[in-house]
Image (cartoon, helix red, strand yellow):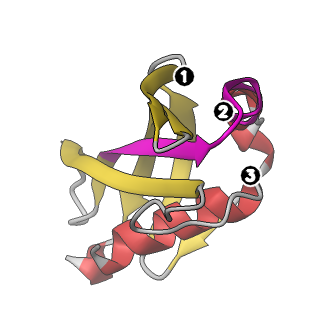
Amino acid sequence: MTGIAESIIGGISRLCKAEPSVRLAADGGAAFYPVSDTLKAAFLDGGELREMKIKVKFKGEVPSELFGAAEEFCAADFSRFDIEGEGFRIIRVEPLERPAMESCSENGMNIVSFVIAAEYILEKEQL
């Protein structure tokens, strides 16, 4: 993961109290995968408005608990949090899709996933 992606995912996961990992563990957990990072607008001062799409996966034994955790994550009010890192500031986080069952009973484990978007301003110094 890039430094900015790692910082964005770390900030979002801390606010939602979901420990981030790059891979899902065999015994379950949450994982965050940067899917895309696109330029939405370029500013005259050299800064950029960007949008990062992040796939979030929850793995565990009980599907209802996974859906509950995913829905709670998606319902979080990100507007009340300031997520800033070195050279960037997140201005909007929102789910792009509803949680869905991705894998069912794989070795007794289930995976629920969804995609969120994090819109952020990249300051000129990071370019």
Q: Are marks 1 and 3 in contact (CB under 8 Å)?
A: no
Mark 2 vs mark 3, CA separation in Å: 10 Å
69 with respect to 50 (left or right): right
Task: Tell me whether circle 2 and circle 1 mark residues in contact (CB < 8 Å).
Answer: yes
Q: Do we see residue 98 in this rendering?
A: yes
At horizontal 49% and vertical 19% (from top left) the residue drawn is 100
Few, some or many C-alpha atoms within 10 Å of disc 3 (few <14, some 14-19, many ≥20)? Answer: some
Q: Label 1 belongs to which residue?
A: 99
Q: Residue at x 54, y 22 (%)?
A: 99
- Examine the rendered structure and indicate whether residue 53 appears above or below residue 5: above
Residue 111 point in image, percent of width and height? 50, 36
The residue labelled by disc 3 is 16
Q: Which residue is mark 2?
A: 70
Between the C-alphas of marks 2 and 1, the distance is 6 Å
Give whichever of 4, 28 is nearer the camera. 28
Task: From the top left corner, tell me how far across and down residue 92 is, in percent.
Answer: 55, 40
Magenta stretch in the rendered image: 51-70
Q: Nearer the viewer, residue 16 or 25?
A: 25
In depth, the one of 109 and 59 nearer the eye is 109
The quarter of the image holding the C terminus is: bottom left
Q: Amino acid type of disc 2?
A: Ala
Q: Note whether 30 is above or below 71 in the view shown.
A: below
Left or right placement of residue 33 versus residue 29 in this view: left
Is residue 118 in view? no
